[in-house]
Image (cartoon, rainbow, N blue to C red):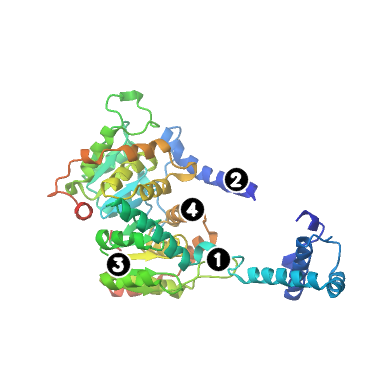
Amino acid sequence: MDRFKGRPKHRSKMDSNEVEKNAYLDNELALMDKLGMESKLVTDDLDTLLDNDKDLLIRVEELKAQFHDRAKTPFSTEEDADDIYDADEHGARSQQIISARSDAGNKEVIPPENFSHVCGEIYRSSFPRPENFTFLRDRLKLKSILVLIPEEYPAENMSFMEETGIELFQVGMSGNKEPFVNIPSDLLTKALEVVLNPANHPILIHCNRGKHRTGCLVGCIRKLQNWSLTMIFDEYRRFAFPKVRALDQQFIELYDDTGIIKLATENNWLSVEW
Amino acid sequence: MSITENRQDDDDEDVICLDEEIETGHSKLTILHPPNERIVPPLNFCPVERYLYRSGQPSNVNFPFLLNLKLKTIIWLANEEPQDALLEFCDEHNIQLQFAAINPDGGEDDNPWDGLTEHSIRNALQSIVNSENYPLLVCCGMGRHRTGTVVGCLRRLMGWNLASVSEEYRRFTGSRGGRILVELLIEAFDIKSVEIDREKAPNWLLTALS
């Protein structure tokens, strides 16, 4: 990358057209870099060059395709990889662990990562995998699960829940990711309505890592318990570590709880039980 | 990038220092009033199981919060006495304060940085497996290592796999991370040495043992 040092990058001040044009230029320069050419060539030279060299043209087209594919995947810019549920990874790892453990004839239970008791019969965790099912069924004796991701629930989790009669609630939200993606307050209220209802207990709240979305929801429960914001943030950070998001904390602070307080009071769900 | 990260770490340290000063007794910072109509849980507070809680040393500002928990027992994991305010609070509200001494022979020389012994862990667990002591709070100076040791041994008693036990322990250890010695102590602890009276055990423990 050193060779591009001289190029100014004032992205923030450019309009979208310019950004696009520059992104294109970046790609071309990176291409030339890949092809081992001098980057002082400008785009016009490259076109002339390609017209005269069919082999080079093919290689360039291939490389271009790779670049554009990569740009399209959501992992690069859109969302934190942690926030995205990856079905393949989910299944593969579990298979490994389960077969390893049945060999050992082990009676230990495996709680999901980032698992904790929240209050009353409310629990939180990351995405439960098949190796965690015994724990959820035999230890927590769950009645329901509230999932905060918008993606479809994986088949193995669905069939586990059907077998055990655990009810699934889904309030899909994408995480508070800077700059402009926000969890809408009414979604949070909907989620709280499920969580606070004793008819659904014991209940497990989870998203993908159990850090951000789950952290926001638990933060709002703590607000209903009248915790000071400082200690709510402290708890949020403990579970989100090392990926703490200022925006999540801001969300917890700004969340308007009048709607849910009214609803919960009418249903006699307050104060939240320990 | 690495410079910004370091800065963040430093900020973390600042927050922690305030409390570590209390732990080492250099200065006592007392906050008398909680923010309006808000309650303040003690540092590192978290529910462990139903009616079983963990935290750092509670101080004045936390007492309204503790009243919500309707505690019957507090297990204090240190040889030295906790702050007078906590002693008075327990007195006033009929909360039994148990001292699970770190080293019963250590006396005044007891070093707060020393870990727990097998003996003191067993003492604490013996109270935890008896539901007559509930609701129950387990705490030490910062709610990190000593409390973490006891909770870790309890998790093993409940049949948790060690990786999950370690993950939970480290969640509460702050920016300086976990101590290998604590984890070795948890791994080596003889869970069979805890005597459980099934008549008195909390429900979640019975579920775990069945």
Q: Is residue A41 left or right of residue B71?
A: right
Corner quadrant of residue B114:
top left
Q: Along the line of sight, which residue is nearer the eye, A218 or B29?
A: A218
The residue carrying mark 1 is A177
At mark 1, the secondary structure is: loop
The residue carrying mark 3 is A270
Residue A69 locus on image (x, y percent): 64, 71
Which label is found at residue B6? 2
At mark 2, the secondary structure is: helix
Residue B145 locus on image (x, y percent): 38, 40
Do the residues under discs 4 and 1 have CB atoms within 8 angstroms?
Answer: no
Residue A273 locus on image (x, y percent): 28, 61
At mark 3, the secondary structure is: loop
Q: Is residue B62 above or below residue A137?
A: above
Q: Gap between marks 2 and 4, in whole Å?
A: 15 Å
At mark 4, the secondary structure is: loop
Q: Along the line of sight, which residue is nearer the eye, A129 or A52?
A: A52
Q: Gap between marks 4 and 1, in whole Å?
A: 16 Å
Q: Which amino acid type is shown beneath numbered disc 3?
A: Leu
Are both tags, 2 and 4, on one chain?
A: no
Q: Which amino acid type is shown beneath numbered disc 1?
A: Lys
Q: Which amino acid type is shown beneath numbered disc 2?
A: Asn
Figure quadrant of the C terminus of chain B: bottom left
Are both tags, 3 and 4, on one chain?
A: yes
* Chain that bears disc 1: A
Q: Gap between marks 2 and 1, in whole Å?
A: 23 Å
* Upstream in sequence: badge 4 or badge 1: 1
Are both tags, 3 and 1, on one chain?
A: yes
